[in-house]
Amino acid sequence: MSLRPLIRATLACPALGALSTLAVALPLLLHGQPATAAGPGADPRGAFLAANCANCHGTQGRAEGAMPPLAGRPAAQTVLAMRQFRDGQRPATLMHQIARGYRDDEVAAIAAYFEAQK
Ligand code: HEC
């Protein structure tokens, strides 16, 4: 396969250009960063995966208003809630769908990240 059409399309569309930059940068960020906000030794995926929660639960889990904050919540509590949402054991309007999008190890990384946010 020739890369030429792809490069041309990338140059023609600034959004695609930004996306391809991200495609290059993301693996570097995911694998190249030794420490995160959750401290050395923490699963570096936590911060990135937890960014998916920020729209509703606030930046770094610091929710304002009616949304439950996740920052500082014990990891075991977040893991349990996510499992219950996923398995339909906990009433939800949205979280039952969202919880299905993450594997157990990803939820553990997210939960550890939020616990470390004070
Ligand atoms: C689109 C908005 C939205 C996003 C994105 C979102 N949540 Fe939620 N979350 C909710 C709502 C709404 C509730 C209340 C339960 C419900 O109605 O689903 C909730 C509840 C929760 C609760 C239970 C809080 C409590 O005290 O009962 C946890 C834990 C949680 N979310 C974790 C997460 C995690 C982790 C992510 C990211 C992977 C996430 N949420 C992403 C909307 C969202």
Image (tube, rainbow, N blue to C red):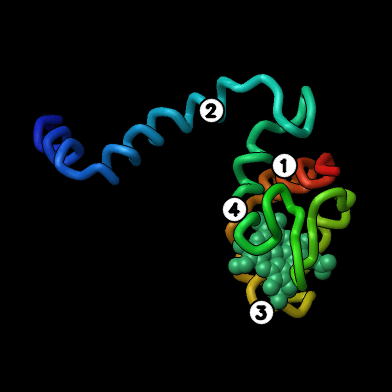
Q: Residue at x 77, y 33 (%)?
A: 38
Marks 3 and 1, how far apart in space? 24 Å
Question: What kind of residue is marked 4?
Answer: Asn
Marks 2 and 1, how far apart in space? 16 Å
Label 3: element kind: loop
Residue toward you, 114 or 41: 114
Question: What kind of residue is marked 3?
Answer: Thr
Label 4: element kind: helix
Confirm or reject: label 4 Cβ below 8 Å from ligand 1.
yes
Q: Which residue is mark 4?
A: 52
- Ligand 1 is in which quadrant of the figure? bottom right
Q: Which residue is mark 2?
A: 29
Q: Which residue is mark 3?
A: 93
Label 2: element kind: helix
Marks 2 and 4, how far apart in space? 16 Å
Confirm or reject: label 3 Cβ below 8 Å from ligand 1.
yes
Counting from the top left corner in percent of width and height, residue 61 is at 74, 53
Q: Residues within 10 Å of mark 4 (few under 14, many from 20)?
A: few
Question: What kind of residue is marked 1?
Answer: Ala
> Looking at the image, is 115 positioned above or below residue 78?
above
Q: Nearer the viewer, mark 1 or mark 4?
A: 4
